[in-house]
């Protein structure tokens, strides 16, 4: 059993590392790429503003994780009972994740700047602007967390690793293009695009993941129809 679990789960170890790199490589690239263009002092200042916004947006990441862990047993049980019930519960989970995104990101988008100034002082006002853009990233955080239930129940761990590695490559490539011109804002858009590809676009390639992509899109478009799946 231990051998079987290791064979099944080793991709998730690398996946976790790749996901961490995808989330953190921006800071390294901002520092390295800007230091040669504007000097070390300004590059460090840019990284500081970006890091403040990143830490604050990551602090909200526990909300979808708690919801996913709470719903995971019901989703797994539904898979053993019937495919219809299984997909219904996945759909409801995606609806809930998108609703949570709206509840958290819309106020954050408008209140990010005053919140950052209140907590860190007026010298970190640029971080507030970055935080308002980071609010868009919560969409991918929530949907990706919800998708983990599908990945686990279908044992698509190697596929998950593949999407993470593609996400890292796309993130680094777009960072290389955008950071010199747009600095931290370019890094944020690089992250958003890479998550769009790794969480959504790649599902179009494989037949086993297309149904889940349809469920995610349907959940987004009908989030107000959330109901208790029986």
Image (cartoon, grey):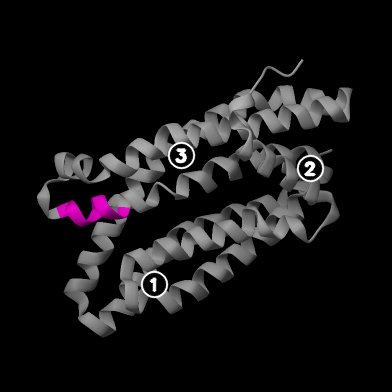
Element type where label 1 sits in the image: helix
- Return the residue at label 2: 5
Quadrant of the frame with the N terminus: top right
State which tag comes first along the sequence, 1 or 3. Answer: 1
Tag 1 and tag 2, C-beta contact below 8 Å: no
When the figure is inspected, residue 45 is found, relative to residue 152, above or below; the finding is below
Looking at the image, residue 206 sits to the left or right of residue 120; the answer is right
Which percent across, then down, holds residue 11? 71, 54
Between disc 1 and disc 2, whose residue precedes?
2
Q: Is residue 79 above or below residue 121?
A: above
- Segment colored magenta: 124-130
Query: On screen, 180 above or below 101?
Result: below
Question: Residue 188 location in percent, x, y?
Answer: 40, 61
- The residue depicted at 26 percent of the width and 84 percent of the height is 37
Q: Which residue is mark 3?
A: 61
- Residue in view at x 61 percent, y 23 percent: 70
Is residue 32 located in the magenta-colored stretch of the structure? no
Which residue occupies 47% across, 65% down? 190
Q: Quadrant of residue 65?
A: top right
- Magenta-colored stretch includes residue 126: yes
Please identify the quadrant where the C terminus is shown: top right
Helix, strand or loop for the magenta stretch, by majority: helix
Crowd band around label 3 with a 10 angstrom C-alpha radius: few (<14), some (14–19), many (20+) = some
């Amino acid at each position: 059993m231990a051998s079987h679990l290791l064979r099944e789960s080793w991709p998730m170890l690398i996946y976790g590392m790749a996901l961490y790199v995808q989330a953190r490589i921006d800071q390294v690239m901002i520092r390295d790429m800007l230091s040669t263009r504007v000097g070390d002092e300004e590059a460090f200042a840019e990284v500081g503003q970006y890091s403040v916004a990143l830490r604050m947006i990551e602090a909200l990441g526990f909300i979808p994780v708690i919801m996913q862990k709470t719903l995971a047993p019901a989703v797994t049980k539904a898979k053993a009972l019937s495919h219809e019930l299984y997909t219904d519960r996945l759909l409801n989970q995606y609806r809930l994740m998108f609703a949570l995104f709206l509840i958290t990101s819309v106020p954050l988008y408008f209140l990010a700047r005053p919140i950052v100034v209140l907590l860190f002082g007026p010298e970190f006002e640029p971080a507030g602007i970055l935080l308002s853009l980071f609010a868009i990233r919560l969409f991918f955080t929530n949907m990706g967390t919800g998708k983990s239930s599908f990945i686990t129940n279908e044992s698509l761990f190697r596929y998950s690793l593949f999407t993470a590695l593609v996400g890292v490559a796309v993130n680094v490539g777009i960072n290389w293009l955008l950071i010199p011109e747009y600095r931290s804002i370019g890094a944020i858009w690089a992250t958003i695009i890479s998550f769009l590809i790794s969480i959504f676009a790649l599902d179009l390639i494989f037949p086993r993941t297309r149904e889940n992509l349809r469920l995610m899109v349907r959940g987004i478009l009908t989030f107000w129809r959330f109901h208790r799946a029986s």
